[in-house]
Image (tube, grey):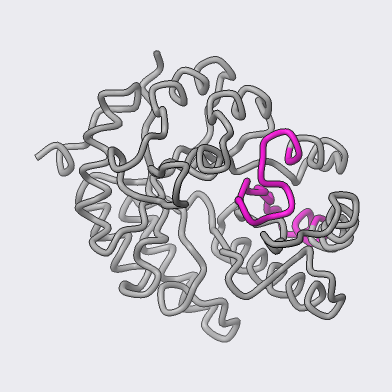
């Protein structure tokens, strides 16, 4: 079994800690690779602040901190909305996030493929049409800026499971598109994360790890739920995965939860903890 290194997604810090403080604090614990969530006050999209942000990211990079991806959560946008105005607004927000990534030298943006009502979602064909319309605009912009888009399997999104996400990405057929596969999201909807990874195979460019049960959707520290992480590690070996594996732990005290999670995952086929974690 390949021992896979772990990076950190910063979702647990979006309301409490500016990006630079967050990354430097976790870097001091031994982490080098990060997926930063775009959400003020953690990290804003402000265009007029871009020169300062470039300087800041350059300074972080010189300290050995690598931001491998940005993540724009679907809190205020919907690329698959039934309202054309909302789709247009959402496309522009994602274009701004693509520009932010490009300006900061970050090559991938995690993209939530729309939001569906759990009570009465539109037919699959309709959501595919709306998503294709939005992505046509985003793909051309992402290509021009050298940024890849990783569509995530989110329970409330247009394509919540591996089969529908795989079918959509393959149908679009753009080299810009890949998949961000979230093991907790898959487990919550009743999908085997290992089976989902095998189905998606080479389309996967980012993997998110956190824990949940199937009774309530969570992104808890590892050990609080029942996601089969050892199976996930084996599946990553089977598909020859070489991309990022990010801890996406959302807890009131995220640092301690991240460290405890890493210690547990190190017993299930992931890389041993850095010195600052093992202590």
Q: Quadrant of the N terminus?
A: top left
Query: Which residues lie in the magenta part?
Result: 139-165
Q: Quadrant of the C terminus?
A: top left
The front one of 66 and 213 is 213
Q: Quadrant of residue 85?
A: bottom right
Q: Quadrant of residue 247?
A: top left
Residue 265: x percent and y percent? Answer: 30, 31
Is 268 located above or below residue 152 in the figure? above
Q: Quadrant of residue 72?
A: bottom right
Q: Is residue 123 left or right of residue 241?
A: right
Q: As drawn, which residue projects farthest toward the bottom?
A: 48
Q: Is residue 140 left or right of residue 227?
A: right
The front one of 58 and 84 is 84
Residue 21: x percent and y percent? Answer: 29, 68
Residue at 36% over, 61% down: 12
Residue at 80% over, 55% down: 139
Asked whether 154 falls inside the magenta stretch, the response is: yes
Is 18 located above or below residue 275 in the figure? below
Is 79 located above or below residue 163 in the figure? below
Residue 262: x percent and y percent? Answer: 27, 38
Residue 143: x percent and y percent? Answer: 78, 53
The front one of 118 and 147 is 118
Residue at 54% over, 25% down: 194
Question: How many discs mark residues in the rendered view?
Answer: 0
Residue at 73% over, 33% down: 163
Q: Is residue 135 left or right of residue 250?
A: right
């Amino acid at each position: 079994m390949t021992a896979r290194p772990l990076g950190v997604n910063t979702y647990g810090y979006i309301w409490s800690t500016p990006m630079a403080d967050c990354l430097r604090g976790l870097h001091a614990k031994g982490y080098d690779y990060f997926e930063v969530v775009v959400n003020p006050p953690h990290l804003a999209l402000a265009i007029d602040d871009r020169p300062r942000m470039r300087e800041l990211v350059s300074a972080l990079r010189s300290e050995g901190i690598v931001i491998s991806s940005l993540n724009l959560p679907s809190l205020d946008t919907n690329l698959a909305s039934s309202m054309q105005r909302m789709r247009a607004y959402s496309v522009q927000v994602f274009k701004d996030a693509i520009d932010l990534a490009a300006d900061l030298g970050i090559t991938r943006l995690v993209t939530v493929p729309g939001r569906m009502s759990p009570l009465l979602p539109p037919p699959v064909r309709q959501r595919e049409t709306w998503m294709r319309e939005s992505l046509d605009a985003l793909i051309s912009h992402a290509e021009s800026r050298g940024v890849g888009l990783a569509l995530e399997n989110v329970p409330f999104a247009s394509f919540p499971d591996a089969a529908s996400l795989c079918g959509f990405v393959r149908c679009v057929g753009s080299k810009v598109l890949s998949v961000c596969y979230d093991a907790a999201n898959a487990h919550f909807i009743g999908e085997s994360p290992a089976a989902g990874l095998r189905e998606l195979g080479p389309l996967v460019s980012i993997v998110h790890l956190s824990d949940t049960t199937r009774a309530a959707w969570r992104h808890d520290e590892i050990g609080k739920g029942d996601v089969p992480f050892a199976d996930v590690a084996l599946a990553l070996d089977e598909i020859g995965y070489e991309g990022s594996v990010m801890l996406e732990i959302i807890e009131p005290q995220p640092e301690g939860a991240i460290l405890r999670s890493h210690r547990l995952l190190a017993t299930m086929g992931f890389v041993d903890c850095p010195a600052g974690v093992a202590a």
